Image (cartoon, helix red, strand yellow):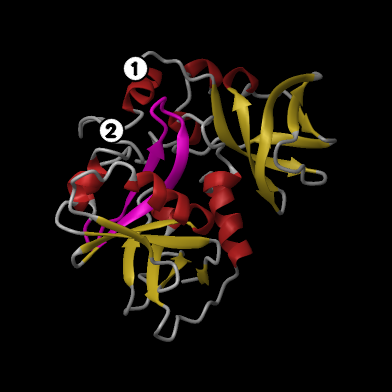
Amino acid sequence: MPITHLSGRGVVELTGPDRLGFLQGLVSNDVAAATPERAVWAALLTPQGKWLADFFILAEAERLLLDVEANQAEMLVQRLSRFRLRAKVTLRDASAELAVLAAWGGTPPPPGMIAAPDPRLPEAGWRLLADRAAPLPVADATEADWDLHRLRLGLPDGSRDLEAEKTVLLEAGFDELGGVSWSKGCYMGQELTARTKYRGLLKRRIVPVTVAGGLPPAGTPVLRDGVEVGAMRSARDGHGLALLRLDALVPGVTLTADGAVLTPAVPGWMKLPAAAE
């Protein structure tokens, strides 16, 4: 099983008797479903329903651990703390104590870590947290290997693919990939998320693409017959993600970005309207 250290990830710790109920009312997924053997993928949204951060929630002993982008950990602590009021919960950045790793390839990871399968897709492997005070597992893969693996699966990678205060969760596959609970009750940003789903308001999706030519930088406009229909997101080794209008996902249509030719590779897990399939 390939395993790699994710240097760009950090950990936020929540402790206290109210930790579960506190987080439950703020994030997009059902926090109660997190157990020592099961991680939950969730997002924090603005009140208007736009993405701010996403993370994996792992339960361990008397705490919840959020596997989040390292550069978002402090922001996440500050934003969540605003809603603490009288809740008996303590939040802190535990990135200096816990390292984040990813493993994939089918077999379970080595023992001695906090570990749970990646809840998005079975092929995504495992999310791992390891104590930095102990010897860390030896990495036999690079972060670039993991990056290419998740791009081929069509999995977005936080702020590399999503825009703060702009991206709607359903554009980024949070519905099909299990990042939203439709039954748990209210949370911040729920109204827009539900309206987008049930009224069929989605017009764009973040879609895997293969790239022939030089990799366009993130933000490069994607064109169809000279008309802008989207923008590039992250990319590596001929594979990438692009935010595309649904009406651009038509077989046989040529898409270009900065001279490169893009071919959408819609994964089997992604559900598109019949006209876009």
Residue positioned 30% across, 55% down in the render? 39
Residue underneath mark 1: 198
Would you say 160 lies left or right of 99 here?
A: right
Residue extending farthest to the bottom is 135
Q: Given the image, on which type of amino acid does mark 2 rest?
A: Tyr
Residue for point 21% across, 31% down:
183
What is the number of callouts on the image? 2
93 up-or-down from 152: above or below: below
Majority secondary structure of the magenta segment? strand
Q: In the current view of this chain or complex, which residue is farthest to the left? A: 17
**Is there any visible trace of residue 121 in the rendered image?**
no
Earlier in the chain: of badge 1 and badge 2, it is 2
Q: Residue 182 lies in what quarter of the image?
A: top left
- Regarding mark 1 in the picture, which secondary structure is present there? helix
| Occupied quadrant, residue 106 | bottom left
Residue situated in front as seen by the camera: 270 or 52: 52
Count residues near mark 2 (Cα–Cα under 10 Å), then give few for <14, some for 14-19, many for 20+. Answer: many
Secondary structure under the numbered disc 2 in the rendered image: loop
Query: Residue 11: percent from the left, percent from the top?
Result: 40, 62
From the top left corner, tell me how far across and down residue 255 is, in percent: 74, 28
Q: Residues within 10 Å of mark 1 (few under 14, many from 20)?
A: few
Q: Is residue 273 magenta?
A: no
Which residue is denoted by mark 2 in the rendering? 187
Please provide percent x and percent y for residue 33.
21, 49
Q: Give the magenta-colored segment's residue range.
A: 35-59
Q: Position of residue 78 (x, y in %)?
A: 40, 49
- Is 83 on the left-hand or right-hand side of 205? left
Relative to residue 66, is residue 211 drawn left or right?
Answer: right
